[in-house]
Image: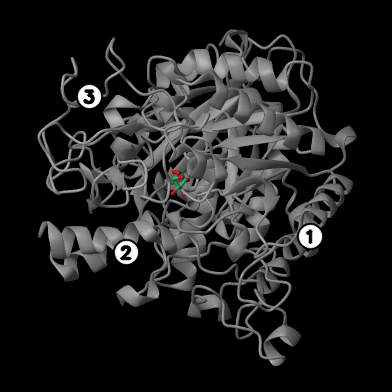
Amino acid sequence: MTNSQRTVLPDSVRTNGATHNPWWDDAVVYQIYPRSFQDSNGDGMGDLRGIERRLPYLASLGVDVLWLSPVYKSPQCDNGYDIADYEKIDPRFGTMADMDRLLAAAHHYGLRVIMDLVVNHTSDEHPWFQASRDKNDPHADWYWWRPARPGHTPGSPGAEPNRWGGSFGGSAWTYDPRRGEYYLHTFSKKQPDLNWENPQVRQAVYRMMNWWMDRGIDGFRMDVITLISKFVDRNGRLPGEAGSLIKDLPAGEEGYSSPWPFSMDGPRLDEYLKEMRKAVFSGRDGYMTVGEGQGISPARNAAITDPNNHELDMLFLFDHVDCDQDGAKWNIEPLRLTRLKKALDGEQKAVGGKGWASLYFDNHDQPRSVSRWGDDRSPAARTRSAKALALLMHMHRGTPYIYQGEELGMTNAHFTRLDQYRDIESINAFHQRVEVAHVQSAASMMRSLAKVGRDNSRTPMQWDDSTYAGFEEADAVDDGGKAPWISVNPNKDEINAEAELHDPDSVFNFYRRLIALRHTDPVVSAGDFHLLDPSDEHVYDFTRTLGQSQIITVVNVSGSPARIPTQASDLLRRADTRDRDTRLLISTDTQERLRHGIRTGVLDPWMAFSLETRLPKEA
Ligand code: GLC
């Protein structure tokens, strides 16, 4: 879409509080997980040249921004979220010349590119960490080093500085015999946490960010950025450390206590984000920043993304994607729609007056939403439920994020054996919970992994129905190309881009329409959000209102027929009386089927639609 076709709104309408509407006020972002997107050289791993080759596809979908998950030099213990050199491209993905080419080519298509910024931690192979292992090196204080617990032999069980557990299993502390101390790692032991208290660390990070911005990228997605400020007592001690004034939490079911409550949204987060904004972005234009927002409440989201506070443009919140968990990630319960409504409503309401929202269901850490909350058991149910969930999310107010393959209705991997998994979190969690802590049986844990494990969204992108789904080019396969690093979902025969591009009723073409609507209809990008029937367990309904224009969205989030709830049904009846002023914006069904549903008050399974109407003047 050219800029001239886009609707331009008066200033300050779209992102509340902004003096000028930012360029991303009606943008749609597409996340690429490079290792699974497109392999151009037959080594079984997606790469930058592969992404370049697929730019026409992305442009035809109509998205505006590409977010690349990490492609920096990395030992890949967490698929690149463990960076050994921020200013080098990992040879698995290509070269810096490939990166420059990709940037230029993307810009040529009118696509902006944001990079993943992983600075809560580095790889243990990063030169900063290696230098830090020497107490006399200038980098000595760049990480969280602590001595063994007094009275314990360093390196022996129980000698860890406190009881914290790492997110990928085991203690959050690893003993380094060279330094004779422990270092903190919120994630795996190959991902030591940087000490943001040290101004030299912060300056080094900002320098690196400027280096990338100067190279021509358009901003950053900031990995676990809300963990960078840890709670310490006035003597600089972490909770639970010997002599600390702050207690850590009791140990959980796996035998460790969680560091997260003491690092999410920590005391200096605002200060750091403001400092970063100034050091990297002041004087720049045309960029965007989005932070991963663990522990950020809707109210805090509004504050951090309020343009007057000069912190971040937007954040990913978690309430809505965590709403089928019972405590731990692996204890999953069926979705209760009222919980999802409450979470999303809370997120939307908080930014109604200031700030901004990110809209997402899928990403590289989440399972595929169509398998999680839709129905992937038959092609028809899959297509309908993928569209229903897409419509539900995209008609909210904020910036939508599409994760590669979501636009095709790609499903979970449905792995049945542990050796099919590649994800460090999934594999470690299995061992920890089943073999060490005995909190879940093997069979039950396999079910949890199949439902919410991260590899569900990491199988190769399904371009066509060939052996490796077009992830590797046919000639690379003939020339003895290696099998993809993770297996291709066998449903590529039915679900693939080639088939969907040509089918006007495909999930892909539905996404194209949703994206175009955001670009052309100011009510979609800017209208106020109002949830209609919070207590209905089957139908998700809401309005968006801008001036005299109102969009009514109604989604049957179930595989059974469902009654239209009262508030929606009143509004639809009224809109019907203003027939000439009402138009159908988008729907999962034909006009005829939809009319039938509205007239009888009963929606078909997964029926979803948005109507736009004009409100009478006095309303
Ligand atoms: C974020 C990333 C996830 C990664 C973790 C550690 O949550 O999205 O993939 O494992 O941070 O960097």
Q: Quadrant of the C terminus?
A: top right
Q: Amino acid at mark 3?
A: Pro
Task: Determine whether, in the image, residue 59 is placed left or right of residue 492.
Answer: right
Task: Determine whether, in the image, residue 152 is placed left or right of residue 188.
Answer: left
Image quarter for residue 166? top left
Q: Position of residue 249 (x, y in %)?
A: 15, 29
Q: Amino acid at mark 1?
A: Glu
Local secondary structure at mark 3: loop
Tell me: residue 241, above or below residue 334: above
Is label 1 within 8 A of ligand 1 (CB to nearest ligand atom)?
Answer: no
> Which residue in the protein does label 1 denote?
52
Q: Position of residue 519 (x, y in %)?
A: 74, 36
At a point 47% along the width and 37% down the height, the residue shown is: 132
Q: Quadrant of the N terminus?
A: top right
Image quarter for residue 293? top left
> Which residue in the protein does label 2 denote?
427
Query: Callout 3: few (<14), some (14-19), or many (20+) C-alpha neighbours within 10 Å?
Result: many
